[in-house]
Image: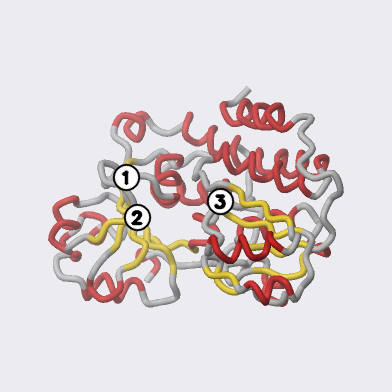
Amino acid sequence: MTKYRLLFLSCLMALNGSAIMAIPPERIAVAGGSITEIIYRLGEQDRIVGVDSTSIFPEEAKGFPSLGYVRNIAVEGVLSLTPDLLLGEEDTGPIKALKQIASVGVKTDIIEKDNTLLALQEKIMRVASLLGVEDKGTLLLEDIQIDLDALSYAKQHLPDSAKTSPPKVLFFLTLENGSPIASGTGTPAHTVVEEAGAINLLADYEGWIKLSPESALALDPDVIIVMNRRQDVFKQIEDLPHFKYMKAVKNKAVYIIDGIYLLGFGPRTPQAIVELGTMIHKDFPLPVGYELRYPRDDLPSMAEL
């Protein structure tokens, strides 16, 4: 039994017998892209009446009325949709808006943020329980378990050199304006890098960190990962002083990956971490028959240009 299957059983046991809502909601306003994606994967999207601007996957979710940005939802916009539940991620706000919405009788349920794979499983079961479709939640957990098992298998079968000396990674949120912003600890990027069997070079620092090009050069990563924001990432790297001297750049070990796909901590994130592992490691052995199954952006690496 793998570590992740133990986590799977633990979150089921923790939620067993808990009645989160006596009557499942039929009109849900959603603030948070991962929650929207979970509801779609549960097949309950007909209950959604509106979403925030981070709810961009799947594509059809963009067709719902907008609540505004997750951190600044519009009270009038939410109430005009007459929801019986506002379901949001931890950064849903502002607090004043949530209090106004609750004051008129709309139930609000905010799911605390925790960038771990266990928390993802718990989030899925919480949403499924709120909707009264626990059986569908269990099936979704079993589905993502395929990716979690593949990830576990790959890390167990890494070459000894990768286990004793894991690749050192810098994960950049952005490279804009010549001021790279990279991931320290406590970020979703830190979690996915470690889960992919690598070392985050900024693990001793908290949050997202502004780096000077000189500081980035001194770290000299084996691999650079950049969250895709639709800019020409590789041109930005070429324009940054000193970056051309980095081991990762010289070896063309620079990759871009969609941020919602990898860092959203929705149902696709376990697959995205598997894919990240194939970028970071020269040899990331996957189980026979395993395939990437969910939609993703086809983004090039520097080696392909």
Q: Position of residue 152 (x, y in %)?
A: 53, 33
Asked whether 124 or 78 is in front, the reply is 78
1 and 3 marks in contact (CB < 8 Å): no
Q: Which residue is mark 2?
A: 171
Secondary structure, mark 2, is strand
Closer mark to the observer between disc 2 and disc 3: 3
Tell me what residue is drawn at x 77 percent, y 65 percent: 83
Q: Which residue is mark 3?
A: 265
Mark found first going from the N terminus, 2 or 1: 2
Q: Position of residue 267 (x, y in %)?
A: 64, 50
Q: Badge 2: how crowded within 10 Å, few (<14), some, or many (20+)?
A: many
Tell me: residue 153, above or below residue 71: above
Tell me what residue is drawn at x 61 percent, y 74 percent: 74
Q: Position of residue 237 (x, y in %)?
A: 26, 70
Q: Name the quarter where the N terminus is drawn.
A: top right
Q: Which residue is mark 1?
A: 200
Could one spot residue 40 in this view of the protein? no
Q: Quadrant of residue 233?
A: bottom left
Secondary structure, mark 3, is loop
Could one spot residue 14 in this view of the protein? yes
